[in-house]
Amino acid sequence: MTDTRESSTRDNAAHSERFAPSAEFAAGAVASRDLYDAAEADRLEFWADQSRQLIHWHKPFTEVLDWSGAPVARWFGDGELNVAYNCLDRHVLAGNGDRVALHWEGEPGDTRTLTYAELTAEVKRAANLLTSLGIRHGDRVAIYLPMIPEAVIAMLAVARIGAVHSVVFGGFSAESLRARIDDAQAKLVITADGSWRKGKVSPLKPAVDAALERGETTVEHLLVVRRAWPDGEKLNWVQGRDLWWDEEIAQVDADHVARGFEAENPLFILYTSGTTGKPKGILHTSGGYLTQAAFTHRNVFDLHPESDVYWCTADVGWITGHSYVVYGPLANGATQLLYEGTPDAPGPGRWWELIEKYGVTILYTAPTAIRSFMKAGRDIPERSDLSSLRLLGSVGEPINPEAWLWYRSVIGGDSTPVVDTWWQTETGGIMISALPGVTETKPGAAQVPLPGISVEVVDDAGEPIEHGDGLLAVTKPWPGMLRGIWGDPERYVETYWSRFADAPDGPWYFAGDGARKDEDGDIWLLGRVDDVMNVSGHRLSTAEIESALVAHPWVAEAAVVGASDETTGQAVVAFVIIRARHRETVSAEGADSLRGHVAEQIGAIARPRQVFVVDELPKTRSGKIMRRLLRDLAEGREIGDTTTLADTTVMQIITDEVNDSR
Ligand code: WT7
């Protein structure tokens, strides 16, 4: 069956419709087939070339990859660079100082524009400020800021002096912030009084205060950006510890010379959820990371820095914000939009109004957002002129073909390429994606590894499969790969490198994702194969939420699953056993306050959609909770095989309890 549209073909199989690049797009495309050929011919030379082209090296490297310390890689090991210089000064020196780096818009509608020259000047001052507060090469700085220009400035200032940032998403609780501060032993926290969300001020500094109250800390100072309350009247202030960013920055020198640091100098730590209750501090370094961020940003988003207006909607608190708001785009001299607030404030069309206002040409967002816009109806985006858009990207979770097609048709005016990009906090940059203008796109599939990236879909024994379902493995080291888990080298090896330790030219990297290779060799991501959930593109661990639940005095035991959800991909569903002495209270009040408790403990993104009170949990004879069965229940399916349960009747009891409370 052939589709009538010129650029589209449809096979017999459902969802294998493909879209060929238009001749016009292909003619102007940044990427070309040559990239695949060059990487195929000599993978290391390919990355070395890209790095030389895209990055300014203070001291050129002569080594490309040293894998002798596997699984810790060294890329461009004898070279030196300054990451911030690459994102700032060199664009100014090349005559592009007047180009807009950031068009920022606050949720209330206030705006700020920063050219590359202005952003460079801000970062130089901020670097001097950090130095004046005693921050040195290698020190850790926690950043807990909303989406305001200072978030970008702070990250680059830390990078500029060779220190290490740990950005903590502003939606995380005081408790989560504290755990991250302690793990990294941060000396300084950069925060704001608050930020604007849904028409209200959402306080931030009070959360930092609460975090720092919990016993002795390594934090010496708090730098506070004035955002929400111009007079600061509502804030608690610790003399000697707390400093206003604007007052301090006015007092430091405007000039700052960026020195080179070694390629493997740590750039940042970013915490992400794993299979245990304790988040992992993913460590990224400088030269390889920046190379991959810049290469992928340029080629996957077909960036024409002189004319494009790029917008990645991710918060800088996530890896997407690190690689595709800060480092990739700025290394490439892109002009981008930064927006503080939520998509629906003040009205449901805010994003589309922003795209029209700033003439956004490239949009990078998450399937969960696309699905909620789909639900709200196409008439909302149709009120704005979206004709400036020429390329759309998706990230964070599998995008279902329906959402992909809606995105292309309603937002992309039936003509833009849509690139579905697979990667992780750990990979540092995009790994699997079509290249626009080169690859035909296929709704629902992330498709093909990028040039220079080697992946396989393997069976349980670690054998690559031609097609069918298996596990995703990365078979060769890549420049942006994590260099470890902060303070826990064993967990690094155990989590990522033990599963395929014996691969022929191993070890191979275990991504934790299930994947399918179809008849064309295209890769479809099938979701996590471990106890990690993906809610609205955010990673959450079942163990972390379970431990938050059992920390509540009511709760004796808890089991958490990720149940499929129409909008958020997965939703958190919890099953709890209540301690005998609290049962009466819970039957009177209900268990709903436990949802709020989780939000307070971890952050609003972790708030369970439902909490069911049960008398028992399904366990194997060895005591392991069978979450698979609870997921069947939460998703309203028939309960799967229960024969390995210690007590096979327990699922019937739980099912009745859950149905009674529904
Ligand atoms: C996990 C990584 C990388 C940026 C945001 C998330 C899932 C990510 C896709 C995609 C299917 C995807 C995977 C992965 N994921 N992108 N295009 N298709 N699944 O980063 O929080 O480190 O989560 O997100 O399950 O392992 P993260």
Image: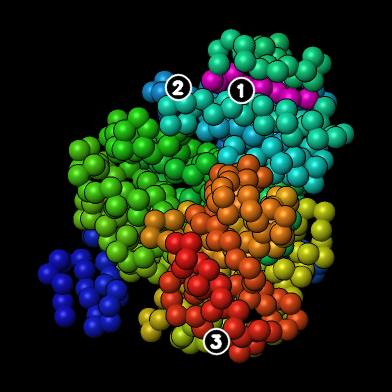
Q: Is residue 511 above or below residue 270?
A: below
- What residue sits right under mark 2 in the picture? 112
Q: Is residue 166 above or below residue 24?
A: above
Magenta-colored span: 221-228
The numbered mark, 2 or 1, whose residue comes first in the sequence reads: 2
Q: Residue at x 70, y 69 (%)?
A: 496
Q: Is residue 330 above or below residue 52?
A: above
Q: CA–CA distance between discs 3 and 1?
A: 52 Å
Residue situated furthest left in the rendering: 4
- What residue sits right under mark 3 in the picture? 641
The chief SS type of the magenta part is strand
Give the image location of residue 432, x and y in percent: 49, 65
Q: Residue at x 46, y 68 (%)?
A: 659
Q: Secondary structure at mark 2?
A: strand
Give the image location of residue 438, x and y in percent: 35, 64
Q: Is residue 355 above or below residue 17?
A: above
Examine the rendering and report whether any part of residue 182 can be seen.
Answer: yes
Q: Nearer the viewer, residue 374 or 124?
A: 374
- What residue sits right under mark 1 in the picture? 193
Give the image location of residue 98, x and y in percent: 45, 24
Q: Residue at x 61, y 85 (%)?
A: 648
The numbered mark, 3 or 2, whose residue comes first in the sequence reads: 2
